[in-house]
Image: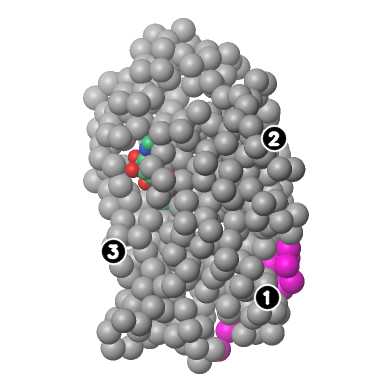
Amino acid sequence: MQESDNQVIKRPLSIDIDLGQRSYPIVIGSGLLTNASTFAGLPRASQAMIVSNATVAPLYANRLKASLQGLYNRVHLVVLPDGEAHKDWHTLNQIFDALLAQACDRKTVLYALGGGVVGDVTGFAAASYMRGIPFVQIPTTLLAQVDSSVGGKTAINHPMGKNMIGAFYQPLRVVCDLDTLQTLPERELSAGLAEVIKYGPIADVALLDWLERNVDALRGRRVAALAHAVRRSCEIKAAVVGQDEREAGLRAVLNFGHTFGHAIEAGMGYGAWLHGEAVGCGLVMAATLSNRLGLVDDAFVLRLRTLVERAGLPVMAPVLDAGDNAGRYLELMRLDKKAEAGEIKFVVIESPGRAGVRGAPDALVREVIDACCLRQ
Ligand code: NAD
Ligand code: GLY
């Protein structure tokens, strides 16, 4: 499919994530925030609270509030500081403070309005306030629409590791209003593309082909192209999470590129590299590892690297330590949640469109890091 027009998506489409009693729809379309029917069928309650941040709230909170007004007696708004550096206890506590100050009961519905940071923190607040209250994800970044709002991973960071404190807790609904992507800074749009690209090598070579044809349309924010990318990404993620909600095995493939990426984020200090930028570079590093393990050929690595670069993402990794740089990467990666008894587990491409999880000798990983790092 070649996308050329900027047509409006007239009818929202819905993808179901099948998790038994915790199943829910992912609704994708234009104009969803301003349409009260988007929120029809959600449980009734006397209060709701929109959780957003200092950047997104001024853009979209009033529209959402107007759409929710008929459903609740009172709709509150709590505005968090913006940024990955604030994905912490202090910010989480701001949500609890607001809920308690408004005497919110356990039927109160939380609405996470923002990118992955707002979604992850709000989801964790929902999982733990009064041992669990309902919440709805309203992702406003490409990254959040194609990945973080779907599947129920919620978390905050610890200074020693990314997303180390959290819970699996599913939302009631995910609402992806594509119109919100029009105000997203260019760098953030590229960051979201990293998570779209990741689905190709792990699950869908046809998506990889499509991305090669449509990456410029995506960067140009063509609505039809964005709709296809969000839909296909959510379909793949819903299928994986439907089979392995709590990451007993299969779900780990969604972390392709993330073991290296998380090390970059932690090593540089949260917020220095965007999560998606670190993942984009991590995709190239993980593909290079797959190549050194003899799983994929040089052409596949080059193909992925070229796409990542065309998406506006870094393909060379930063030096984290002027001395033993590879040692610093290894140290950070040993904290990865997939590590078992100190052995780092990597998501690798077994063959294009199929991923697996395996360990690799430190010496080989060192070679990959040396090959991928940008030395001055
Ligand atoms: P983000 O939440 O920091 O948002 C990026 C920036 O865009 C922020 O400054 C935000 O205020 C701004 N923004 C958001 N929507 C906007 C809009 N429509 N217009 C203008 N500006 C807007 O970052 P992100 O990339 O969305 O998410 C990254 C986070 O997601 C990381 O913390 C990562 O760990 C997490 N994540 C979680 C999962 C999961 O499964 N839970 C998966 C992937 C990533
Ligand atoms: N983003 C990886 C996951 O949700 O499992």
**Please, which colouring scheme is shown?**
one colour
Question: Which residue reaches farthest bottom?
Answer: 363
Q: Say left or right for 136 vs 224.
A: left
The residue mark sitting in front, 1 or 3, is 1
Residue type at tag 2: Asp
Report helix, strand or loop for mark 3: loop
Q: Which residue is mark 2?
A: 16
Could you tell me if the residues under marks 1 and 3 are in contact, i.e. CB atoms within 8 Å?
no
Residue type at tag 1: Ala
Marks 2 and 3, Cα distance to the nearest angstrom? Answer: 36 Å
Task: Provide residue 60's location: percent of width, then percent of height.
Answer: 38, 24
Task: Provide residue 212's location: percent of width, then percent of height.
Answer: 65, 56
Report helix, strand or loop for mark 2: strand
Residue 202 colored in magenta in the image: no
Q: Which residue is mark 1?
A: 299
Q: Which residue is mark 3?
A: 269
Mark 2 CB near ligand 2 (8 Å cut): no
User: What residue lies at 65% left-to-right and 84% top-to-bottom?
Assistant: 293
Q: Earlier in the sequence, mark 2 or mark 3?
A: 2
Task: Provide residue 231's location: percent of width, then percent of height.
Answer: 66, 39
Marks 2 and 1, Cα distance to the nearest angstrom? Answer: 36 Å
